[in-house]
Image (cartoon, helix red, strand yellow):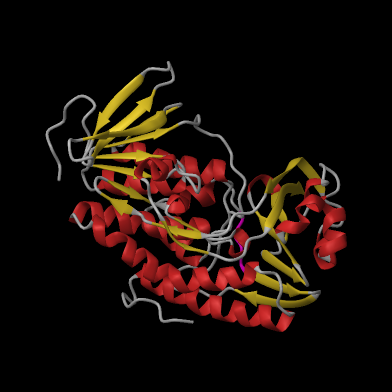
Amino acid sequence: MIRNIRDNSYDVIVVGARCAGASTAMLLARRGARVVVVDHDQPGTDTMSTHALMRAGVFQLRKWGLLHAIIGAGTPAVRRTSFIYDGEVLDIDLKDEDGIASLYAPRRTLLDATLANAAAVAGAELRYGTGFVGFVTDDLGRAIGAKVQTPAGVIEELHAPIVIGADGRRSTVARAAGARVMRTAQNTISCLYQYVRGLPNRGYRWHFAPGAAGGVIPTNEGLSCVFVGLPPEAQAELRKAGPLNLQQIASRFVPALADDLAGVQPTGVPVLFSGLPGFFRQSAGPGWALVGDAGYFRDPISAHGITDALRDAEILADAVIAGTVADYPALRDSLSSDFFALTDRLAGLDGTMGEVQNIHRALNRTMKANQRWVAGSSRDLPKAA
């Protein structure tokens, strides 16, 4: 796979330097590949998400030698997960599993930067302010590189046997490749996020009420990420929320969450995710592959996107090194299919609280099967929920 180095010639081009792309680049560079990563944003830009890491994601960071940096930056340890069903609280204290006794929810400014820095240390070349324009192709139409626009506005050609799109759910790489959507979810939520100050660290708190959901996720600098999720047809209610009235929205739709937010100090303005049904895209083709939300997106109600992205980065990196990229989507889909279906059911926001609890039990079984797979204690595929 490794070739002689020439100017603008690489083993892998990665489009997107956030968690999925930076992880993939880091893992490939650590194994000797010459990697370039391009991202249209500048380093350090934030993005809002339900950025709670689940145990498999924390395990990945520890295995890669990066968890100490996340902890050292002051990311609070989460040792309890609480599910609040229309005010009825179920507290679950975390036990040590696979050497992981705490969860973490680092700000994306910290997590993405930590992964990108690790990629650079491993030898990957990072080019910020540089956008993907299209593929360089051979006479047969196979991708043999990428056309990128530099910060100076110059179109430059980079050459590599594979271009990896890690550029999010509206991936330009996927669009250029003509990647088909292979499976689509039926449901989605509209979600309003905001960082607040003044809450104690009570762990992850997931709230559910008839027709609504919400949560509190402790993160860096004494902040908590708070969100309220409603069906898309109620999006107008979320759009009314200004810097000071997310709690009012919670009071109307998720009263127990409003109780959690008593006395908080909002920081910044809320960010609205309008909603988008989850999907699996065709994630590999001649000279290209997709990772993270570019290839597989699930509704944010399950807060599992980053954990899945770290898992899939390793699956794809292994496939690139082994020369088995064509097989990567099938493994990714096998590990994700049950979780995707259960998340879709949860995002319907139309079940009784008993039905929501049953979905959570099934999700927990699927998460633990994935956790065992990631930790290497079981390489059998997760059984159907």
For image coordinates 56% across by 45% down, the residue present is: 108
Q: Is residue 81 magenta?
A: no
Q: In the image, which residues are magenta? A: 76-80
Kindly indicate the quadrant of the structure image that contains residue 37: top left
Q: Position of residue 340 (x, y in %)?
A: 50, 68
Q: In front: 211, or 262?
A: 211
Q: Looking at this view, is 289 or 266 the one in front?
A: 289
Residue drawn 35% across the image and 44% down it: 177
Regarding residue 61, the answer to whether it shows in the image is: no
Q: Is residue 85 left or right of residue 150?
A: right
Residue in the image at 18% along x and 54% along y: 323
Image coords of residue 310 (percent x, y): 42, 56
Residue at 33%, 71% (x, y): give it.
376
78 magenta-colored: yes
- Magenta residues, dominant SS class: loop
Residue 267, picture quadrant: top right
